[in-house]
Image (cartoon, helix red, strand yellow):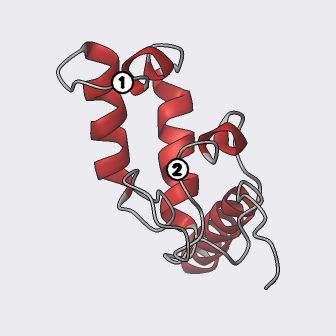
């Protein structure tokens, strides 16, 4: 009985994580104004999709605290709570590395 309960809890946790990854958290769509979602876009600004969660959290916390210099990210990061930073980092980390598929925050590209 305990094993079945533990398995059920594990499956519910996995399902919740998958569902959470499908829905972008508040603020995620605004990131695409500077951070390209497509690997086809040449930009000096890093794509966030598929980056490690901890790296995104660390970068946002460093921008927020002033440890990392930024043109606008330091001001943007100051507006995020710790929970919002965690949610953004988890969502972007769960996105496909190329950033195109399943990313509602992407900027649509013109068809050639």
Q: Position of residue 40 (x, y in %)?
A: 55, 77
Q: Secondary structure at mark 1?
A: loop
Q: Quadrant for residue 60, please give it.
A: top left
Q: Is residue 112 above or below residue 32?
A: below
**Badge 2 density bin: few <14, some 14–19, many ≥20, Cα 10 Å:** some
Compared across the picture, whether 98 is left or right of 69 comes to right
Whether tag 2 and tag 1 are in contact, CB under 8 A, the answer is no
Find residue 6 and report its image quarter: bottom right
Residue 102 in the image: state x and y as whole percent.
Answer: 74, 72
Check disc 1 and report the residue beneath it: 71
- Taking 94 as reference, is 100 above or below it? below
In the image, is 112 to the left or to the right of 42?
A: right
Q: Residue at the far left: name it.
A: 67
Question: Which x, y percent locates residue 105?
Answer: 72, 54
Does 26 appear above or below 82? below
User: Which residue is denoted by mark 2 in the rendering?
Assistant: 35
């Amino acid at each position: 009985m305990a094993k079945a309960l533990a398995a059920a809890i594990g499956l519910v946790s996995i399902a919740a994580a998958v569902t959470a990854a499908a829905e972008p958290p508040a603020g995620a769509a605004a990131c695409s104004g500077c951070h390209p979602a497509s690997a086809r876009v040449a930009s000096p600004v890093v794509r966030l999709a598929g980056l490690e969660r901890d790296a995104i959290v660390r970068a946002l916390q460093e921008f927020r605290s002033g440890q990392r210099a930024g043109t606008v990210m330091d001001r943007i990061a100051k507006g995020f709570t710790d929970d919002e930073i965690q949610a953004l980092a988890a969502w972007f980390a769960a996105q496909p590395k190329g950033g195109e598929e399943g990313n509602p925050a992407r900027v649509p590209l013109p068809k050639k």
